[in-house]
Image: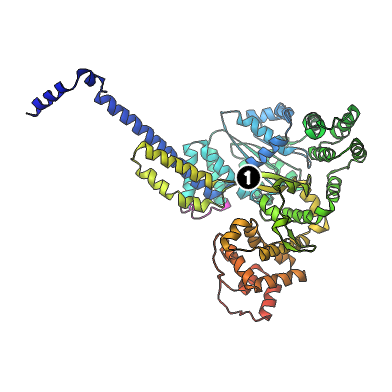
Amino acid sequence: MAAAYAKDLLYQIPPNKVEAEKPVSEILSSIEITGNETKHAVMSMASDHRFAKIEGWLSPPDYSTNANLARKRRHPGTGAWLLNSPVFQEWKLGTRQHLWLYGLAGGGKTVLSTTILDHLLQIDTHTTLAFFFDFSDPRKQKLEDLLRSLAVQLYHAGNEVARRLDSLFTSHGDGRRQPDTNALSACVDTMIQTAGKVFIIIDALDECTAREELLQWLKHLASRKAQLIVTGRPEVEFQSAIPQSFNKRNCVQLDKNVINGDIRSYVEAALEQKPDFVDKNLSQGILEEIRDKIGDGADGMFRWAACQLETLARCLSPAAIEEALESLPSDLNETYRRMVQSIPSEYKSSAIRLLQFLVHTRRPLTLPEAIEVIATEINQEPRGFNVKRRLFQAADVLLYCPSLVIITKVTNYAETAEEYSETTEEYAETVEEYSETTEEYAETVEEYSETTEEYAETVEELHLAHFSVKEYLLKQAQFDLESASISISETCLTYLTDIRGSHSTIRRDFPMARYAAESWMDYAVSAETSEDILRITVSFLRDETTFQRWCRLYQADRRWDHEPGPPGASRLYYACLAGLAGAAKDLTTEGADVNAQGG
């Protein structure tokens, strides 16, 4: 009966319709292909999710910001002599496994490191890793920072390499605990051994704050198979240790005469291309004098030449340029002395205070935070924070410290890593259970992409322009730790006292609130010799409004908590926790309960 019914049904369907339908085998094959494609896409997305969680866990410093800044400063052709040199060619081929390129301050070593990096990135037969130690960024000053960066860079060198870091992540509670330096070092070591041919460039060894630890690691790395180039100044400890690890023949002093050729090309390009010079229609005589005195007078110091060009660019007449050329500073220290001296009087107080922050900050100032520093007056009336003192244009902060500071963009992972992990848990479950339509899958991809963008936040920071700027400033009385700490702690306390609004309003409208809340105590400890700071500190802690405002922004025994809530302990507890002996004594004298529980 059923067969007869089916036969009758087929007679009701036009033959051309039946022929037009795809065979069942073709339909099944199509379903299988679509399913496989979806499976691969979901697996790829799961892998990306895993990497993002590991990246959030390690929060590696972003070396690309240093490389990008060097590229921006680099004149085309700079460093070609190094790439063509027998020493570098031997290193690239493996005849030399390690190189230490050393030279004096301001010689353009970071630009050379970036030139090497860009050259190696064009070669597909190996893995290229890079790291730039950075005096202006505490996130790039320790061996641990270097190792975190290398581990994340190596993750993409192959599945077997990635599994090494996956294992470290798993063994630390899937990211609930942080690895110590030894664990990171061992992991990076095995990743390098697994990755095949690896080139590593490490710039500015002298800007590392843990040199002994770094030198021990370099000694170990020198016994491995990686091809390694490091750069830096010839500091005493480096001159002693690196030749023992690398072999003396692989320690190469950068030739000032060759660098001078790059400097002359750089000066020539600036005169021909920069509007600051082109628009002035300078005479051939003045142009030739600039080439001679700056291009030929730099003595291997790129930084010196760049500073003199910036000074000349600000000159408003031919006579001013000629006068500047007649009295060029002899070295970088004299250059910086003149720069500080030439800051306009109406900016000087704020500029010095801003530089004090940049010299001694525990973490870089974001651009909005730097503007709040300027908007907080502590030296003259009317004192206090005033939103009307905020700059119209954020970039105008450069006018306060011309040639001494720079604005740089960085990718920040640390602030959002915890939130990101929580947000993406649902995504992970979706990947595991995925068996829905392509449309729903596309929505999942879109949501995941948006989450990733939120997780990787790009911010602008204000940095000192060069390591030599910090070195110069530290020699000046205003920039010793005690003097700077007095200014910084008073600025932070004044700011926290003067901002107004609900907690959510303060977090939204006052960008330095968190920085000031987490920083003032550290500097107040170094500033307690100042009776003014002691008085301001005790007054700040005693006042209920400021005490509550501060604790809702930050609590020293809950550093990880970005929403710590109301105070968890007494004023005396926090003063003792920070080591504010003078403030603790005054609070006790005023009747603070020394037996109160807290923390």
Crowding near pointer 1: few (<14 within 10 Å), some, many (20+)? some
Instruction: Provide residue 194's location: percent of width, then percent of height.
Output: 51, 38
Work out whether residue 481 can be spotted: yes
155 sits to left or right of 408: left
Residue at 65% x, 41% y is 65
Q: Is residue 180 magenta-colored?
A: yes
Q: In the rendered view, tell whether residue 446 sits above or below residue 477.
A: above
Residue to which mark 1 is pinned: 410
The foreground one among 240 and 461 is 461
Instruction: Provide residue 93's location: percent of width, then percent of height.
Output: 63, 28
Q: In the rendered view, tell whether residue 356 sits above or below residue 589.
A: above
Q: Secondary structure at mark 1?
A: strand
Residue at 32% x, 31% y is 32
The foreground one among 405 and 300 is 405
Work out whether residue 364 can be spotted: no
Give, as a three-letter code, the residue at label 1. Answer: Val
Instruction: Name the quadrant of the C terminus.
Output: bottom right
Instruction: Name the quadrant of the N terminus.
Output: top left
Residue 120 found in image quarter: top right
Instruction: Provide residue 186's location: percent of width, then percent of height.
Output: 55, 47
Label the magenta part by its dominant secondary structure.
loop
Q: Is residue 95 magenta-colored?
A: no
120 sits to left or right of 325: left
Highlighted range, magenta: 172-181
Residue 352 found in image quarter: bottom right
66 sits to left or right of 51: right
Residue at 86% x, 39% y is 315
